[in-house]
Image: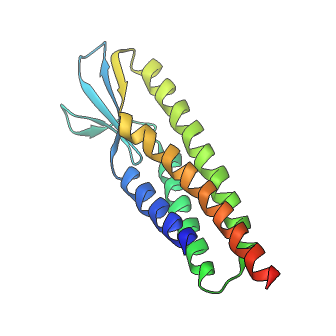
């Protein structure tokens, strides 16, 4: 039961992250403020999308949400082996999301010659919480599988 809650929470949290502002930059050349989301890098002043959209963040976020929901679906059929594999895969995807997120932050910071740049603190913390929830889910699945096998 606990693993279902962990998987549902991780899917909801990643869906929220995929729709929120991840970072804010102020460019040196034009002084405009830019916001990085999973969908695009948006200029706040002109309301234009800057070239080189961070589509990889959105793809990773959607795959994480779908894999969490798939693992949640497997919980109803008590397929523990596949559920553990899906959870491990999802954990690796979350680590990849954090690495790509850091890479995009550094890339856009240098591309815009940003005077000021800041990460949205909760947008960084939520994928880390999702990572912890995925690990907790894995251990709960393993514990439940051991309990079923011992009976």
Where the N terminus falls, by quadrant?
bottom right
The answer to whether residue 82 is above or below residue 130 is below
On screen, residue 81 above or below 104: below
Name the residue: 55% across, 66% down: 68
Q: Residue furthest front?
A: 151
Residue 87 position (above or below residue 121): below
Q: Position of residue 67 (x, y in %)?
A: 58, 66
Asked if residue 133 lies left or right of residue 19, the reply is: right
- Residue at the image position 53 percent from the left and 47 percent from the top: 56
Tell which of 77 and 32 is nearer to you.
77
Residue 148 in which image quadrant: bottom right
Residue 144 on image: x %, y %: 69, 74
Q: Furthest residue to the right?
A: 150
Q: In the image, 86: left or right of 112?
A: right
Instruction: Locate the C terminus and report the quarter of the image it occupies.
Output: bottom right
Please state which of residues 23 and 46 is positioned toward the viewer in this rendering.
Answer: 23
The answer, for residue 91, to whether it is visible in the render is yes
Place of residue 4 in the rendered image (x, y in percent of width and height, measured from the top left)? 53, 72
Residue 53 visible in the shown view: no
Report how many numbered discs are placed on residues in the image: 0
Q: Which residue shows up at 45% across the image and 55% down it? A: 14
Q: Position of residue 85 (x, y in %)?
A: 73, 66
Q: Quadrant of residue 136?
A: bottom right
Relative to 97, 50 lies left or right: left
Q: How is the image coloured?
A: rainbow
Q: Is residue 19 left or right of residue 147?
A: left
Residue at image x 42%, y 56%?
13
């Amino acid at each position: 039961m606990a693993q279902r809650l962990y998987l549902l929470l991780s899917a909801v949290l990643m869906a929220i992250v995929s729709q929120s502002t991840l970072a804010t930059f102020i460019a040196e050349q034009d002084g405009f403020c830019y916001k990085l989301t999973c969908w695009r890098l948006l200029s706040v002043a002109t309301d234009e999308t800057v070239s080189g959209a961070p589509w990889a963040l959105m793809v990773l976020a959607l795959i994480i949400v779908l894999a969490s929901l798939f693992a949640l679906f497997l919980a109803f059929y008590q397929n523990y082996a596949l559920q553990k594999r899906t959870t491990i895969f999802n954990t690796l995807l979350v680590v990849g999301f954090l690495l790509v997120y850091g890479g995009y932050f550094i890339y856009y910071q240098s591309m815009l010659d940003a005077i000021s740049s800041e990460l949205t603190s909760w947008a960084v913390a939520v994928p880390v919480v999702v990572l912890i929830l995925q690990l907790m889910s894995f251990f709960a699945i393993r514990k439940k599988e051991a309990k079923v096998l011992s009976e």
